[in-house]
Amino acid sequence: MSTDLRTEINDCEDVSVTFSTSGGALADEPLAGQFYEGTQAVRAQHSNNDDELYTTTDSGGTGLNIDLSDATAYVLLKDALPQTFANRGVQILLGDGTDRIGYSVGGNDAQGMPVGPFFNVYKLDVSEIVAAPGTNFAVYAGSEANLDQTAVTQFGIGTFHNAKAQGNVANLALDRMTYHANGSYALRINGGTVGTPETMADVQGDDVTNGWGMVANPVGESYWFFAPTEWGEPTANADAYFSAANEQWFWVGDNAGGRAVGATHFPFRVVGNATDTISFVLDNVVIVNTGTRAQFDMSSADVNTLQLDSVTFTDLGAITFPANTASKYANDCIFNNCDQVYFEDLTCNRLTFNGSNDANGAILWDGNSDPSAQDNITLNSDGTGYGIQINLNTASLTTFNIDGYEVNGYETTSGGSTGNTVFFIDNALDGDVTINITNGVGTFSYEVAGGYTGTVTINQTVTVTITVLDTEGSPIEGAKVFLETTPGGVDVITYGITNASGQVSASYAGSTPQAVTGYVRKGTASPVYKAANINDTIGAGGLAATITLVSDE
């Protein structure tokens, strides 16, 4: 079940509730296919100049007086003739009784979000034009500089068409108009059961039935989202079970290339409460963001089940995850050029990060996170920015243990100022940081922020294997292998006897590359072999060396 949380300005069901236009053919439009919400729309004829269509009342005829200064407004419009976005093709109009301005939001090159039948949804983040006035608008009365967005008494659309109007025939239809406060959510999804969870087909079906214009299904298993969405319940109201598989989701943070909403005004969250059961499960879902980045907040501790398998996130904003429980995880997921991701101590496995939009790091570790449950992470640099930011503002954890990390494309030298090392150590706590790496691949370089005076130690545990063969390529069992670091034989790496496969293996935890030296000999029992020296290097992937001994008999 889905719920529209926005406030309705006017449902456009009755032109007699004070609509005005600078064009012609103003009337109700009850024909099937000419409205999206309810039983009719308001029609008008606009021409190849700035024309307006607006109301001064709500659906019941009560005069408007709305503070939209920090809100996002939406209109449903059917119009096939507008100019481009830059040429004010489609505008959302605000008036205060004296000043009336149409702000360009889209056009024939930026068609908002298409919904059926042949309608498009456009949105205007009014806070953006309050903060940065003076761009891309039409003046219908007064001046843009004097418009009071805190007391909007006129609301509607403006258009600039490609062609001159002919006769007195309507060429556009305006349907439901709504708004919501920025920082709030426009659509809530709940309902479903364990056996029959809600699906995207259900959500989009609710949109069509109610004429909201927030979710579209243009083709197949592809879904578009045009408004902030909330999955679950922030206060006790209803259980929420949702599941999706093998789908593509697109978050449209602008008007498909037109005016965008503010940087933090396109949120998504999965949220729960202490009473209701909340379950959110995605499998093989591709999530792509266009325009303003949607922030994904999945950190609610009151969500009972959060399971992400093979989910791909592309160009999203900041992504936050919850604390670890048995029913919450993210496995086999890919993050392409997203903002920073915060996992807390969630169990994760086989994650890949391709670049990042956050220069401080694709992943955040802090004193409240423990990455030891996040295994087999691959970080691929796009040439700029760090891989992992370690922010110790409130740190109680200064030792981090990780397993199976692979890093590619980062600088290999630590301590410089390239801005492209694997780790970036913040300077808020001048304590020592230790990173213990098991089964790591690549060089785990680091930088520290200016003013940081602690010591950073990176211990990379790798496997060292020495294989001893004879000149025929057969393994030699019982050979003595001794291996130590150089110079000076500081640490003994291994001292052992080869097994039936001719091998001796050991673990090494230390910085790489590390030069090593040693010897192999077998000479006390027949067959006797000449001793051989070892001079090699332990790299980021460990050491696998083969030594051939020559028979002395």
Image: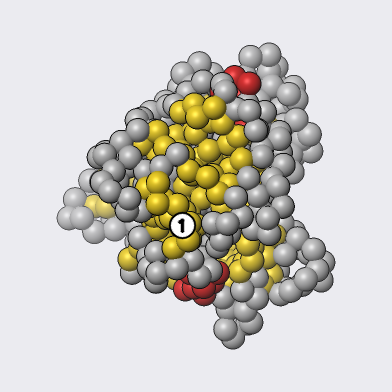
Q: Name which residue type carries label 1.
A: Ala
Query: Is residue 513 shown left or right of residue 373?
Result: left
Of residue 487 and residue 179, the one placed in the foreground of this image is 179
Coordinates of residue 141 in the picture (x, y in percent): 54, 27
Q: Residue furthest left?
A: 472
| Whether residue 175 is situated above or below residue 130 in the rendered picture | below
Q: Is residue 119 above or below residue 153?
A: below
Picture quarter containing residue 151? top right
Residue most extreme to the front: 167
Q: Residue at x 71, y 38 (%)?
A: 67
Residue 356 in sight in this render: no
Position of 83 with respect to 539 (left or right) is left
Camera-side residue of 292 and 368: 292
| Foreground residue among 383 and 522 | 383
Q: Secondary structure at mark 1?
A: strand
Image height of 61 relative to 142, above or below? below
Residue under label 1: 27
Between residues 447 and 157, which one lies in front from this camera angle?
157
Q: x and y percent of residue 13 in the render?
A: 55, 62
- Give percent across and percent down for residue 120: 41, 54
Residue at image position (45%, 52%) is: 26
State how the image is colored.
secondary structure
Instruction: Give the quarter of the figure containing the N terminus.
Output: bottom right
Crowd rating for badge 1 (residues with CA inside 10 Å; few <14, some 14–19, many 20+): some
